[in-house]
Image (cartoon, rainbow, N blue to C red):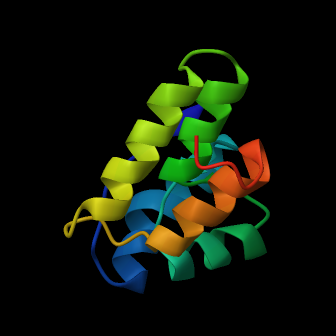
Amino acid sequence: MALNVVSNAGPLMVFSKLIAPALSKNALLLMDEESGRNYARQKNLQVRGSLGVLIEAYAKKLISEDQLRLYFQQISERKDIWINPDLCVRLLEEIFGSDPG
């Protein structure tokens, strides 16, 4: 079961809106915000971020290599998504090697 709520709120709001319901349902928590992810892991919740969801979709052959690379490129270039572009590069290198595609 996946529970997904987008939030830019403070820690108490994150706990009450995301982590507490996930704990009660033993759910996969979808969250990119690092401090919330760390807290959820301390509570033994399974956590996945946007990049992890895309990588899993690729691994399950739901999206192609070209699509995965495109999505990572788009995430890297957007100013309203606060995912470090270096993380995108590193993950793609881990999956495909140092070949840029």
Q: Observer-nearest residue: 62 or 36?
A: 62
Q: Residue at x 75, y 45 (%)?
A: 95
Query: Where 90 falls versus 72 (above or below)?
Result: below
Q: Quadrant of residue 87?
A: bottom right
Q: Quadrant of the N terminus?
A: top right
Query: Where 31 falls versus 84 (above or below)?
Result: above
Q: Residue at x 33, y 84 (%)?
A: 10
Q: Position of residue 98 (x, y in %)?
A: 73, 55
| Residue 63 appearing in the image | yes
Q: Residue at x 57, y 15 (%)?
A: 62
Query: Where 43 falls versus 28 (above or below)?
Result: below
Count of all numbered marks drawn on residues in the image: 0
Q: Position of residue 28 (x, y in %)?
A: 64, 44
Q: Observer-nearest residue: 13 or 51?
A: 51
Q: Position of residue 77 (x, y in %)?
A: 28, 62
Q: Quadrant of the C terminus?
A: top right
Left or right of 21, for residue 74? left
Left or right of 76, for residue 55? right
Q: Residue at x 64, y 51 (%)?
A: 92
Q: Position of residue 47 (x, y in %)?
A: 65, 55
Q: Residue furthest top?
A: 61
| Residue 46 appearing in the image | no
Left or right of 21, for residue 61? right
Q: Observer-nearest residue: 37 or 79?
A: 79
Query: Where 52 falls versus 31 (above or below)?
Result: above
